[in-house]
Amino acid sequence: MNATSTEHRGRGRIGLGDTRDVSSTAAAQVEAGACPAQAEASTTQEERPANSALNDSERAAGREAIVAHLESQGFRVTDAGVLSTVESDKDVWRSLHGEAVVSQRERARKALQRHDRAFTLRLANGDELVPRRIRPRLIHIEDFRSPNSALWRWCSMHWSIPVSSGYGRRLRFLVVDEAHNDSVIGLIGLADPVFSLGARDREVGWTSEQRAERLSHVMEAFVLGAVAPYNELLGGKLIASLLSAAEVQNAFDAKYAHRTTLIAQRDPDARLAMITTNSALGRSSIYNRVRRRDGSLVLRPVGFTNGSGDFHFSGAIYDLMVELARKNLGSAETQRHSRWGGPTIFRNRREVIQRALEAVDLNPKAMRIHGVQRQIYLAPLATNTFSWLRGEDSELHLQTEPAAAIGEWWRERWAIPRSESRSGWQSFDRESWRLYPEQG
């Protein structure tokens, strides 16, 4: 995912019966729809109401607000209740996420605004950077309340699409440059993968039973990219290469190798055998052709998502949809497991969105087909990843390297040649990355 800046705009709260224009609201998150429901419901109390249902006026107002929100993004809802997909153009796709990026930044303002100046100083100015000296180091963020955790979040707010908080098991890493005062090079965020992903499952070649048994050995990179000015030196290829770093493997082993699963209550004896990821928008020039020193691909392109998901229901409109789903629930059971904690009564975003759309007589399946396809990549971390995941091999033959060795290869293969052929990286001014510049 490439980082870009976006115009700052405010976000309003939409309530039932409020039919004002919703063009300043947001739209984004993960295509899998498995992000926890409470991730965006910070302004909505999800207590189970007394037996009730939406009345006709509330249903009409809710439908009108959702349709207006979609149209403000460039979609069109047909008379048959089908979402017309947008054209296949990266600029158009990027603009679809613009409102959601703004909304996410505004949600983070209270937590991050006071750090804006200090975090800006953790970036390297282009004229201070010496490509031949870059020396990457991975910092595993173990405490989600630490300054490094806040810095990770602040950096992620500059992505061109909104960043999910991940779900289930999670590992986050800052990649910093030891040779330049630990300036931030990029971010890695790993979380549980979606259960069913056709392109991945076909490539692995496992059965549904094997997948259910061994998916614990796979993680999804929900954040993977470089920040300025390193992104101009193909820093994204470095961050992608670091998926196979020994430090990532060690962090996974320490935290999740024998962590009892919440629902099944079993020790998965987990090994990190593969990481999957998606491009931000269509085909990725950054993730393509990323090779190890031995010539093997770090990331294998295996297909595209089908252009469906929930990213276009976020921000204020998602708050409204939580309210719609909650109020229309009545005494019905939700899909949430009894062992899961948290303040929400719903299983995840997908359940909230499905119930809300059903409540206002919109087809959830049709409304999720937005047409924005993302390229799917697999990063096998062993020479026999696929056969091991299928249960055919008893030993996993990992092909990991220390981050320092990966950084040395990247520096010689990509960073130095790019620095000699392009000069744009030298003009980067870290002050341009202020999220809240009006604060001085």
Image (tube, helix red, strand yellow):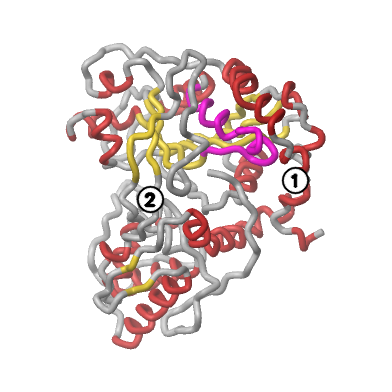
Q: Quadrant of the C terminus?
A: bottom right
- Amino acid type, mark 1: Thr
Is residue 142 left or right of 50 when viewed as pictured?
right
Which secondary structure lies at badge 1?
Answer: helix
Which residue is under mark 1?
120
199 to 90, vertically: above or below: above
Which residue range is magenta in the image? 224-244
**Residue 225 belongs to the span the image colors magenta:** yes
Kindly identify the residue that appears in the image at 33 percent across and 68 percent down: 84
Q: Residue 213 occupies which quadrant of the picture?
A: top left
288 to 337, vertically: above or below: above
- How far is mark 1 from mark 2, CA to CA? 33 Å
Judge by depth and name the residue closer to the eye, 248 or 275: 275
Can residue 50 be seen here? The reply is: no
- The main secondary structure of the magenta stretch is helix
Is residue 365 left or right of 373 when viewed as pictured?
left
